[in-house]
């Protein structure tokens, strides 16, 4: 983990960089990321798939900050995007990576499809027959051939929070795997569409390898059927979804996890000749590389309960309230005694759902103290909002001994600039 106390009495740091100094320089709330940790995780993924033709398409939605996209592009990553905006982000920092982009999402618009066609992306992960019709129309109009994969819904159950599970028939994602063959036949007749792959994504924060193997098995069978139908399917996109452990008390070995995951996916395709695996990890690459730094504003008691009120709120990190997600919270100054309190750690936003932790046992905190909310690198900043007219946080990237501001704090002027009274 990149955020650690270097010694029993030393304050929490990101590698060699003191978090207190970053907070002093850039203010709070502040997202801090470790570039080394992201590179390390990406390397683990690469190693786990070594010897198998593959491309890791980082799921941009997990953290779409330009500096992180640039860093990953330099490592050779491709990208999984879900909007024209995300594609523009990739093009802004790594135009050469356009050919390594896959485009997912159930609601792609004509302008988004046009942008992707013009950019020459690798693959459109088509999620409905309506989208296929629209893509065929836009491709013909622009005279650009589109390589397509159908995102099939494999009807595989994966244990995770219901909001982030996607692989069941009752979900809005993908095309029923039983209909896929017919839809491919239709696509193959269109001179502007090139059926080149199949994709699947069963959900996020999935911590066991089995569901990934089960989904990949079903898709691999479909690849065989389609090849029998004469379609040259070259890509199997296994989606993202590999989870991490948010509870410090639970052991977590990323090296082992990614090995098990890769083994399950690779086993499914072992009989397929000439297949390129596409993987779309998001969380696994960036979650644990990031922390949200916040300052304690007040500590108060209401009846039996103690509330630690920080200057970061649900608009900065919505995961605890949206998914009942657990994030460890550490004081930046190491606790001087063994004394603990049980408190809710909350933000300033006017909602009872504005919390980071409930009834958490913590070292005693007082106003002015800094805390780090861990494992906030994925789906933290990318889900941030301006609720309560709060400017979004600044972001810092730590590379070795250097720390660099990669996004300045959003100002009031930024927020008001789009409005007309
Ligand atoms: N590919 C597709 C098509 C996806 O929909 C997603 C995530 C991914 C890849 C990346 O999944 P990952 O490897 O990060 O699990 N906001 C939620 C997570 C939403 C995930 C949405 N789709 C959270 O904070 O837990």
Image (cartoon, rainbow, N blue to C red):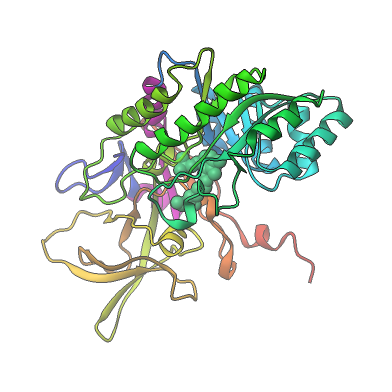
Q: Which residues are magenta?
A: 20-48
Residue toward you, 152 or 148: 152
Q: Is residue 290 above or below residue 230?
A: below
Residue 366: image location, x then y, percent: 27, 69
- Report whether 390 appears left or right of 196: left
x then y, percent, for residue 203? 47, 45
- Residue at coordinates 12% horizontally, 66% vertically from top-left? 339
Which quadrant does the C terminus fall into?
A: bottom right
**In terms of depth relative to the viewer, which is nearer, 77 or 240?**
240
**Magenta region includes residue 76:** no
- The picture places residue 117, in percent across and down from the top left corner, at 76, 30
Q: Quadrant of residue 371?
A: bottom left
* Residue at x 78%, y 36% (from the top left corner): 135
Residue occupying the far left of the picture: 338
The reply to whether residue 143 is visible in this rendering is yes
Image spot of residue 335 (x, y percent) = 17, 58
Rendering quarter of residue 228:
top right
Q: Is residue 63 visible?
A: no
The number of numbered discs placed on residues in the rendered structure image is 0
The residue at 20%/63% (across/down) is 363
Q: Quadrant of the N terminus?
A: top left
Q: Main secondary structure of the magenta part?
A: helix
Which residue does the image show at 44% across and 76% down from the upper left?
Answer: 352
């Amino acid at each position: 983990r990149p955020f650690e106390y270097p010694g029993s009495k030393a304050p929490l740091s990101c590698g060699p960089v003191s978090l207190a100094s970053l907070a002093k320089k850039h203010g709070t709330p502040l997202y801090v990321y470790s570039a080394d940790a992201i590179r390390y995780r990406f390397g683990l993924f690469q190693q786990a798939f070594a010897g198998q033709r593959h491309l890791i398409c980082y799921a941009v939605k997990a953290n779409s900050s330009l500096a992180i996209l640039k860093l990953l592009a330099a490592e050779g990553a491709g990208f999984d995007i879900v909007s024209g905006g995300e594609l523009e982000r990739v093009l802004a920092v790594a135009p050469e990576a356009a050919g390594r982009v896959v485009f997912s999402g159930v609601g792609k618009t004509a302008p988004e499809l046009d942008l992707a066609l013009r950019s020459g992306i690798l693959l459109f992960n088509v999620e409905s027959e309506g989208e296929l019709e629209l893509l065929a129309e836009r491709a013909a109009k622009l005279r650009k051939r589109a390589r397509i994969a159908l995102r099939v819904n494999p009807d595989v159950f994966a244990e995770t929070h219901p909001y982030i599970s996607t692989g069941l028939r009752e979900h809005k994602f993908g095309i029923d795997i039983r209909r896929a063959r017919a839809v491919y036949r239709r696509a193959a007749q269109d001179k502007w569409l090139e059926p080149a792959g199949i994709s699947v994504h069963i959900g996020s924060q999935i911590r066991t390898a089995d569901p990934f193997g089960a989904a990949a098995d079903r898709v691999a069978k479909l690849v065989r059927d389609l090849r029998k139908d004469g379609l040259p399917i070259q890509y199997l996109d296994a989606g993202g979804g590999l989870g991490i452990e948010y509870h410090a008390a639970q052991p977590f070995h990323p090296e082992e996890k990614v090995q098990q995951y890769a083994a399950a996916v690779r086993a499914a395709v072992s009989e397929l000749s000439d297949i390129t695996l596409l993987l779309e990890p998001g969380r696994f690459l960036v979650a644990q590389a990031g922390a949200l730094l916040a300052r304690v504003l007040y500590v108060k008691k209401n009846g039996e309960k103690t509330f630690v009120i920080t200057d970061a709120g649900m608009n900065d990190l919505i995961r605890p309230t949206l998914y009942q997600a657990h994030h460890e919270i550490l004081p930046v100054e190491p606790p001087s005694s063994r004394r603990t309190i049980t408190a809710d750690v909350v933000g300033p936003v006017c909602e009872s759902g504005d919390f980071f932790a409930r009834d958490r046992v913590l070292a005693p905190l007082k106003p002015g103290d800094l805390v780090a909310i861990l494992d906030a690198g994925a789906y933290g900043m990318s889900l941030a909002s301006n609720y309560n007219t709060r400017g979004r946080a600044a972001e810092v990237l730590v590379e070795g001994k250097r720390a660099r501001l990669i996004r300045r704090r959003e100002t009031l002027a930024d927020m008001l600039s789009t409005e007309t009274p």
